[in-house]
Amino acid sequence: MFDKLIYIETFGCQMNVNDSERIVTMLADLGYAPTNDPASADMILLNTCSVRGGAEEKVYRRLANLRIYKRDGKKQIIAVGGCVAQQEGEELLRKLPYLDLVIGTHNLHLLQDSIKGESRLSRFVTVMQGCDNFCSYCIVPYVRGREISRRSSDILTEVRQLADEGVREVILLGQNVNSYGLKSDHEPSFAELIRQVADVDGIDRIRFTTSHPKDMSDELIACFGDIPKLSGQIHLPAQSGSDAVLKLMGRGYTRESYLGKVRKLKSIRPDIVITGDIIVGFPGESDADFEQTLSLMEEVRYIDLFSFVYSPRPGTKAAELSDDLPRAVKMARLDRLMELQRRHTMEISLPYVGSLMTVLVEGEGKLPGQISGKADIGRIVNFTGDSSLIGSFVDVRITKAYPNSFLGEL
Ligand code: 5AD
Ligand code: SF4
C-alpha cells in the first residue's frame, strides 16, 4: 500500500494539528505512511507556528537538527508548513539550501501538486504576488505586501521555456489570480492571460489558483466553456455561507452572489468540479450562521474542501473582535462540516467509476508496477502501467474512488 514514509512535527495551535492530519491523508494517496522516526523518513515536515515570539528561531534550530537525516544519496524531502512558512515563503528556501518545499497555510490545497512538482511535468508559474483585499482574518496582505502583477510578457516567456523543457501542465499562481492586471493599463485581464498561455504549444493543461469570488468575472467564467486546455476544476473559497459572517470577514460578496458565480460556472461547464476553503468559528458565528455554511455546501457540492478553525492573527482586524465561542463548539462545528464533506466527496467521486479520464502521467504510483498522474479534474489517479508512459497523457478507466484519489486501468 505505502512505499514512502513521512515524519511530521507539529507546533502550535489546533489548526496546525488539524492541518497535519489533513496532510497525512493527502500524502497517503502519494504512497506516504506516517512514521515516528525521522531517520527513515522520505519526507520530513515541520508544521510551524509563529504566534509566539522566537518561533522562527526555533524552527531554524530544529531544521538544522533534522537536516542531518538528509544524507547524500537519499532523496529525502524536507518541508516547512504552517504560519512560519506562510510568512517567510520563498525567503526560507533561499536561506536554507537543504529545504525543498514550503507549504504556507494558504496553499495546503496545493500540497500534492507541490510534491509531485519534482516530476517536472507540472509546474507553478507565479503571475502575481501579494494581496490588497485585507480580509479581516488574514495576515497575507501584511506579510506579503500589496498586490503586484508580473508582466504578461515575462510570464509567457517563462511558460514557453517550461514547454521547451518538457513541462505539459502549468498552474498559474497568486493569492488572488483573478485580479491579475486589473490595476495596470498595460497588462491583459487574467482571462486574456489564460488564452495567451493556452496558445503556447506543448502546454496542454492549465490550472490556476487561488480565485477570489468577488473578482471572478464573466469573462473568466467564459474561459471554462471554450478553452479545452483549461482544467475542469476550480478552487473558489467561500469562507462562510452566512452573509453576516462574510460581511465581518470583509469578503466583498454575499452568499447569493457566490452561489450565482457557481451556477454560472456549472452552466458553462456542467462537469466542472469545485474545491473551496471554509473557516469555522469566526468571531460571532452563531449556530444559524454555521447552518448557512452547511447549506451553502449542499448547494455547491464541493469535491474537496479545506476547512479551518478560525485562529486570530495578531495585527489583523478580526483579532480585535471578541472571540468568545468556546473551543469545544468550534471543534464540534468543524467535525460536522468535515463529516458532511466526506459524504459529498464520495457522492461526487463514485459516479466517475466506469468513466474514462485523461491523465497526465507524472510518476510512479502507490504500489509497485503502478504509475500515477492527475486527471483533468485535479484528482490523483493510480493505475497499473509502464513507467515509459511518464510524461504523456493517457486515457484511464476509473475502477475505484477513494477520498483523495482514484484507482483505474489503462
Ligand atoms: N484562521 C483560520 N483560517 C484562516 N485562513 C486564512 N487565515 C485564517 C485564520 N486567521 C484560511 C482561509 C484561507 C485558507 C488558505 O486559510 O480559509 O482561504
Ligand atoms: Fe488573505 Fe483575503 Fe487576500 Fe486571500 S484574498 S490572501 S484571504 S486577504
Image (cartoon, grey):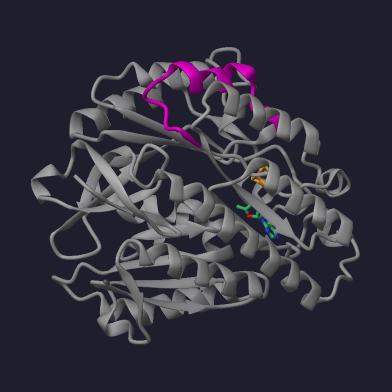
Q: Is residue 87 visible?
A: no
Q: Nearer the viewer, residue 103 or 340?
A: 340
Specify the farthest residue to the bottom.
37
Q: Looking at the figure, which quarter contains the N terminus?
A: bottom left
Q: Is residue 23 visible?
A: yes
Left or right: where 295 falls relative to 355? right
Q: Quadrant of ligand 1?
A: bottom right
Q: Position of residue 398 (x, y in %)?
A: 31, 47
Left or right: where 62 falls relative to 183? left
Q: Position of residue 11 (x, y in %)?
A: 56, 78
- Segment tinted magenta in the rendering: 214-233
Q: Residue at x 53, y 51 (%)?
A: 347
Q: Looking at the figure, which quarter contains the C terminus?
A: top left
The relative height of residue 79 versus residue 252 in the rendered view (above or below) is: below
The relative height of residue 338 versus residue 139 in the rendered view (above or below) is: below
Residue 368 lies in the magenta stretch: no
Q: Position of residue 325 (x, y in %)?
A: 86, 70
Left or right: where 210 falls relative to 173? right
The relative height of residue 342 versus residue 330 in the rendered view (above or below) is: above
Q: Residue at x 22, y 58 (%)?
A: 365
Q: Position of residue 61 (x, y in %)?
A: 45, 79
Q: Residue at x 64, y 21 (%)?
A: 217
Please identify the quarter of the rendering in which residue 123 is found: top left
Left or right: where 373 falls relative to 307? left
Q: Nearer the viewer, residue 385 or 196?
A: 385
